[in-house]
Every structure is written in C-alpha cells, then in structure tokens.
Amino acid sequence: MDKEEALYFLCRLAQGIALMFGDQCETVVHEMKGNSMKNIAIYNGHVSGRSVNSTLSIYGNDTALDEEGSFRLDADYLNQLVVTRSGKQIKSSTFHLSGKDYHYALGINYDITVMGRMRRLLEGMTMAEGELRASLATSASGDICALFDACLKLVNKPLEKMKKTDKLALVGLLKEKGAFNVRRSVPYVAERLDVSKYTVYNYLNELEGGSS
C-alpha cells in the first residue's frame, strides 16, 4: 500500500465510522511527523473543536510546539479516557499506519460526557440503603429489645431474682405495650426470661383468663 492508497483508505474508514456512530463520534486522520501531528481529515470535529490542517491534539495543545520526545506518538492507544479543558469526557483510541514514505494515524474519539451524567443519575436512582424485609426485621428486633428493657425497669427487679409472679407481671407489661405484635417476640422474651416459649404462651393465656 503506497502513501496515496493508505491516505484514501484511512479517510474512507474515518468517514464511515463517524457516520455509523453519529455526531458524538469524531474521527480524524493525522499525518505524523516526528513529535507533531497534522490533522489532514476530520469528521465531527466539533467534539474536540479541531479542524483540518491544525496541529492541535485532542487536549488542545499545539503538537508543533512540543519538545521532541515529550510524548510517544508512534504507539496505538485503545479505549483511553480524555478530559478536555472544557470538561468534556471522551473515550479515545488511536491506530497507526506507516510505510516507506508515510506515517498516518487514525483517531476515534467518542464524547461520553452525557452518558457519564446519565450513569451517575441512574446509579443515584437505583441505589438503595438496604433490603426492606431485612431492615424491618432489624428494626423490629431493636424495638422489642428496647421495649423489654423499659418494662424490666418498671418491674424493678433483676431477671435472675424473678419469681413466676414477677415474670407474669413483666409479660403483662409487654403485652400492654404491644410487644407481642412484633414478629418473633415470644422467642425473644422467652430467652430473656430463661423460660421456654411455651411458658410465655401460658403466661399470656393466664393474663387473658384474668382479664375476661
């Protein structure tokens, strides 16, 4: 492939890619000379703000003024992030094609600024603080614990010294406060009182019988 054929092929390829991916996709054909590059064909140049015959890089600096060897301009770069001076976010890839008397590069630059904002918006919209069922269970567990301790203070007797009448009084207080409307409250109360859950149910039945 001679110089003319290489340039013709790259320009056709650049135009085709730009048409296929739309106006947020800039494609540019660079002529590489030492440490500088010249943009000899560009499509959707509004993405980076460059035009044909300029020597500006995608960052906006003039490559003709760069010191020799300050950048490596002979290697392919794939799927790299560029943040321009104006704050645009661009995914950029560069592919080189060189021959005996030519060195060209094809740049593909896709503006993802809006997509980045959409991604952050979607992350915010879909983010959840926790799973509701688990949160409800945790909340209920915390409530019954606090409620038990509050009723225990009212009975004013250490658990280890309680007799049946004391435990019955404590269960009665818990019932008045609605503690047994909380899921798995009976096993919790039974564990705290060091009795079986069937004993707690018996206490509740006694209280029901006494109130009828």
Image: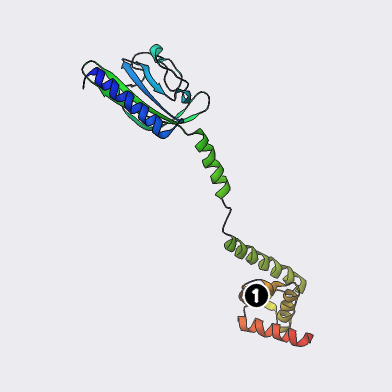
Question: Where is 186 relative to 107, above or below?
Answer: below
85 or 163, which is in the foreground? Answer: 85
Q: Position of residue 38 (x, y in %)?
A: 36, 16
Q: Secondary structure at mark 1?
A: helix
Please identify the quadrant where the N terminus is shown.
top left
Q: Is residue 18 left or right of residue 76?
A: right
| Residue 92 showing in the rendered view | no
Question: Where is 2 relative to 205, above or below?
Answer: above
Write the residue at 73% across / 80% down: 166
The scheme the figure's colours follow is rainbow
* Most distant residue in the top direction: 65
105 or 189, which is in the foreground? Answer: 105
Write the residue at 77% across / 87% down: 210
| Residue 165 showing in the rendered view | yes
Please identify the quadrant where the C terminus is shown.
bottom right
Question: Where is 52 relative to 130, above or below?
Answer: above
Q: Position of residue 163 (x, y in %)?
A: 70, 82
Residue at numbered disc 1: 189
Q: Which of the 4 quarters of the picture holds residue 165?
A: bottom right
Packing grade of label 1 (10 A; few <14, some 14-19, many >=20) is many
Q: Position of residue 182 (x, y in %)?
A: 66, 71
